[in-house]
Amino acid sequence: MIQYKEIYDILPMLIIAFSATFILMLEVFIKKSEPVIYVFSILAVLGAIGTSFMRINTEMIIFNQFLKLSNTAIAFSVIMLVGVLITVIASKSYIEKENINFGEYYSLVLFSLLGMMLMVFANDILIIFIGLELMSICFYVLAGFLRLRQKSNESALKYFLLGAFMTGFILYGIALIYGSTGSTNLVAIYAMPNVTSNYVFVIGTSLVVIGFMFKIGVFPFQMWIPDVYDGAPTVISGMLSTAGKIAAVGTLLPMVFNLKIANFKLIFAVAAVATMLYGNVIALAQTNIKRLLAYSSIASAGYIFVGIASMSEFAVKGIAYYLIAYTFMQLGAFIVVSIIEKKDDGSRDYKNIDLEYYKGLGKRNPVIALYMTLFLFSLAGIPPFAGFWGKYYLFYSAIQANMIWLAVVGILLSLIGVYYYIKVIVYMWFSDADESIMTEKISFANTGAAASFLAVVGTILLGIDPSIFFKLFKFVTE
């Protein structure tokens, strides 16, 4: 039986679910409701963040064993909420600029957030699947929200077709897991003796893992990322690369940590190396800033898998820290791109997402160039920014797990990434563009500026004192 107290335990999810539905009502019954919806969406996410901290240091299974509360799940949930909050704040000026200021935009963002939260708090494979589908369907629509832009429609269709195909992997894997164990309850499955020696269970688990590797963007399942991120609305690209990735990682981690299938450890390590190599090397050749950040996102998936391959408690904490740092720096970079980009006259395409346009940005708008520089330094892993500590914790977890070779390879491949980040910085501060570009003005007095400022603050604060995050969620790093 569901108890009244359990409603209080899932208050953040209820706030998001109610708000997403209520926004649809506002859109229908109130004319020119967009400003109200915008403010309401921000308040809803803030309310969900505030109520999430009420359950810190709680470990319990609720709702007839369908959901599980834990510090780790709450931490991942708050990271996703922060990412969505920054996305929502940045969205207003962007969707007004693109003439797609429709109320259902915010509703879709919140419904996708609800799906992510269900995945992270799930204690049943079926709840994971329901959350995954809710998140994915919203993402497919949001990726094609620039309805008049052909590239956006292409990205949505590619994402939908490949995502639906990978969903089949997950669904078949769930069927095999249920067939071999007779249960969909994760705690019950983890408690079964010798379950990992059952080859049907191992195959089923492998299919589920492959499905989530696709969502995270791990090689060789990363093929959708560059095209989707390039075609989607830029603020949505930022959300896909952060909150969407976090939801998949937060769902996969408990499975890996609790099952600890020995063969998976080496597979994850090889996948990590291949993903870091592919993402960093291909990014070197990119001339499109959105595609460069997309390949950077693939490389980041490789760093995350270094932690997953370590299969330790410290690795879980390191992954959680890296993801909050990654949310600030990656999302901040995409928001800066969204502020700068604009359409060609008489065209539905963009002329200034090429790296050439970033030449001389420091002279045209020093503040926005400074923000982008901070985000790129952090993504490169240069101290004292948050990205440095994120990579440090992940590589150190590999050393603790006696996988020194993986840490060394990860560090070397990370150095490749420094080149293409520094190249953009050099373009911004030490190169001059054509006179026609240098005379263009970039407006920075909008909601995107406020969102990017929050991302800058997070990137710097977590870099100066990384213990803030661990103290907040009662994590101990020693």
Image (cartoon, rainbow, N blue to C red):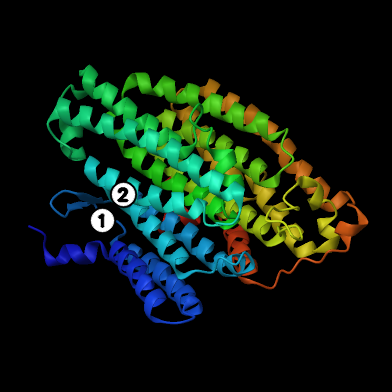
The reply, left or right, for residue 217 in relation to residue 357 is left
Q: Position of residue 256 (x, y in %)?
A: 33, 32
Q: Position of residue 33 (x, y in %)?
A: 46, 79
| SS for callout 1 | loop
| Residue 62 placement: quadrant | bottom left
Identify residue for label 2.
Answer: 131
Of labels 1 and 2, the one closer to you: 2
Point 74% across, 69% down: residue? 443
Q: Position of residue 221 (x, y in %)?
A: 48, 30
The reply, left or right, for residue 253 in relation to residue 380 is left
The reply, left or right, for residue 164 in relation to residue 127 is right
Point 38% across, 38% down: residue? 164
Q: Is residue 390 visible?
A: yes
Q: Quadrant of the C terminus?
A: top left
Quick check: 305 above or below 140? above
Point 34% across, 51% down: residue? 134
Q: Which mark is residue 129?
A: none
In the rendered structure, which amino acid carries the disc numbered 2?
A: Gly
| Residue 95 placement: quadrant | bottom right
Tell which circle, 1 or 2, labels the residue nearer the N-terminal end.
1
Q: Position of residue 254 (x, y in %)?
A: 31, 39
In the rendered structure, which amino acid carries the disc numbered 1?
A: Thr
**Neighbours of disc 2 within 10 Å: few (<14), some (14-19), many (20+):** many
Q: CA distance from mark 1 to mark 2?
A: 22 Å
Identify residue for label 1.
Answer: 58
Q: Quadrant of the N terminus?
A: bottom left
| SS for callout 2 | helix
Point 49% across, 76% down: residue? 34
Name the foreground residue: 67 vs 72: 67
**Neighbours of disc 1 within 10 Å: few (<14), some (14-19), many (20+):** some
Name the foreground residue: 7 vs 238: 238
| Residue 282 placement: quadrant | top right
